[in-house]
Image (spheres, rainbow, N blue to C red):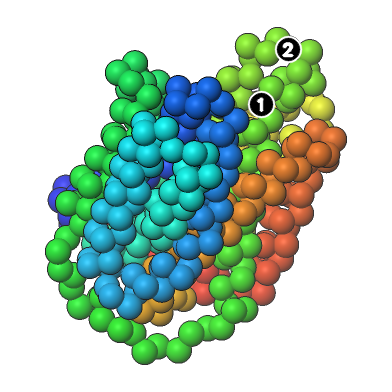
Amino acid sequence: MSLFTHRAYWRWSAGVQLARLPATMAPLAFTLLTTATTGSYRLGGVLMSVYVVAEMAGAVPVGRLIDRVGVTRGLPALLLLTAAGFGVLAFAASAGAPNAVLLALVLLPGVAAGALSGGFRTLLADTVDDDLLPRAISVDAMLLEGVLIGGPALVALLDLAGSLVPLIAMAAACVCAAVLVPRHGGEREQVDSAPSPGAGGYLPWLCCAFTVGLLLSTIEVAPLPLVQRLGAPDTAAPIVIVVLSGASILGSALYAWRGKTGDPRLFLGGFVLGGLALAGDFGWPGLLASVAVIGGCTGPLVAATSVNLQRLLPKNRRSAGFSLSFTVQACGFGLGSLAVGVLPLWLAPVFGVFAAAIAGAMLVAKPAGAIGTTSVTS
């Protein structure tokens, strides 16, 4: 079956984009909410920090819970719990609750949302056949770029109707996502007794996920200093993000069109070259070329990592395993952001280069067949 006529995939895609939308809306939504209700935009930043910490802390244990109860039962419950958390937070803010209460309440949607990405990724394994998986992940990566851009824009639009409206929309998105989750799964949801390859088998792929977050954050957090280093005006900073997003979409599109899992070592090599060029000061051509190379390799590396992780993870541990992968990637993003804040600009990308080189070295000993170059049909 063609992916583009695969109704179950597009139902899954609609559900996962709706589930992701609140996370992309949250930073601006929290800031606008607290500014309107308490007069402090700083509280919004603290709320977002607590939300992210709660997500990371709850990702693996909540993922294990989804594995135990089944993804088609656990995922809708988590989505409804997340929706309830956003609703309660909006009500408390409108009622003038103390700051400490708001910080406590944001823990509920944070912990509940931590395993949503892992749960949906597990559901994808039950939705499409293995030969369609690389293409499915690549198409999803392209759609994700739209969600990342659309989330803040939607908040800005909804805020015109009131500071509580974005949180209500976030809750509604979670409810709609829950409705799209199938009510029963197939035989793939049964417990898999296959032996686990051990931590050593997962480590290279977790390192790949960490590298993606680490190097991407170096660009996404630092477009302003990157253009200032070239003597360009601050208004040129969005060009860096546009090139990064455009290259990421194009890379994912080419990867989906090619229809193979591919060798992640090639994409890690692109990260190394792009990161080294980013660290150097080679003018506008060097900056744009390095950003384009990193963006173009991002989607394929994410897809190859995800496919290979699925091959290793036992079926009864997939939600926890994928949740761990997303958490590791988020940790990389946080550390990359910190590096931009405390290190010289030229040095920050070097850590991403180092991580990519380590991940590549871990995969050097693996035979090509173990990494996979599976073909897919259109």
Asked whether the viewer can see residue 292, the reply is no
Within the image, what quadrant is residue 96 found in? top left
Badge 2 is on which residue?
A: 232
Exactly how many numbered labels are in the figure?
2
Image position of 74 with respect to 246: above or below: below
Q: Residue visible at 62% across and 68% down?
A: 204
Q: Residue visible at 46% across and 76% down?
A: 312
Badge 1 is on which residue?
A: 223
Marks 1 and 2, how far apart at CA? 11 Å
Within the image, what quadrant is residue 66 found in? bottom left
Indicate the amino acid at tag 1. Answer: Pro
Front-most of residues 269 and 206: 206
Q: Residue visible at 43% across and 49% down?
A: 105
Image position of 250 with respect to 207: above or below: above
| Sequence-earlier tag: 1 or 2 | 1
The quadrant in which the N terminus is found is: bottom left
Front-most of residues 179 and 345: 179
SS state under label 1: helix
Q: Position of residue 251 (x, y in %)?
A: 48, 40
Indicate the amino acid at tag 2. Answer: Ala
Q: Residue visible at 17% across and 51% down?
A: 179
Q: Position of residue 221 (x, y in %)?
A: 65, 33
Q: Are marks 1 and 2 in contact (CB under 8 Å)?
A: no
